[in-house]
Amino acid sequence: MELLPPVGWADVATKTDLEAQTALLRSEFRADLESSLRQLESKMFTAFLTVIGVLATMAGLLVAVLLRS
């Protein structure tokens, strides 16, 4: 009797309960991961556009310097 849980058997998780909880956690994890990936993609695209702008500016300055010489 010492090995029985201190609560009633209705409070013990069943295999079905564990499977449902696992499915819920996986669903939440996937949603969080997809959200994080969308944010990362957006930030990388912004950084890419910034780099393109900087490179275009540098190319323009280089052309101006070369034409001035």
Image (spheres, rainbow, N blue to C red):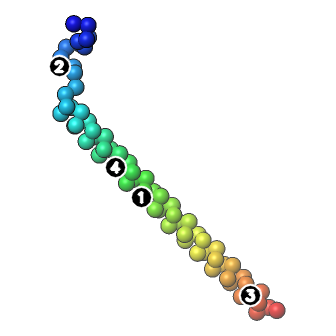
- The answer for how far apart the CA atoms under marks 3 and 4 are is 51 Å
- Give me the residue at 45% from left, 57% from top: 39
Give the SS element for disc 2.
helix
Give the amino acid type for the residue marked by disc 4 in the picture.
Arg
Of badges 4 and 1, nearer the viewer stands 4
Give the SS element for disc 4.
helix
Give the amino acid type for the residue marked by disc 1 in the picture.
Arg
- Give me the residue at 51% from left, 61% from top: 43
Q: Which residue is mark 3?
A: 64
Residue 69 in picture, x, y percent from top left: 82, 92
Vertically, is 63 above or below 27? below
- The answer for how far apart the CA atoms under marks 1 and 3 are is 39 Å
Vertically, is 31 above or below 59? above
- Give me the residue at 17% from left, 19% from top: 10
Of badges 2 and 3, nearer the viewer stands 2
Q: Which residue is mark 4?
A: 30
Residue 31 in picture, x, y percent from top left: 34, 49
Q: Callout 4: few (<14), some (14-19), or many (20+) C-alpha neighbours within 10 Å?
A: few
- The answer for how far apart the CA atoms under marks 4 and 1 are is 12 Å
Give the amino acid type for the residue marked by disc 3 in the picture.
Ala
Q: Which residue is mark 1?
A: 38
Q: Earlier in the sequence, mark 4 or mark 1?
A: 4
Give the SS element for disc 1.
helix
Q: Earlier in the sequence, mark 2 or mark 3?
A: 2
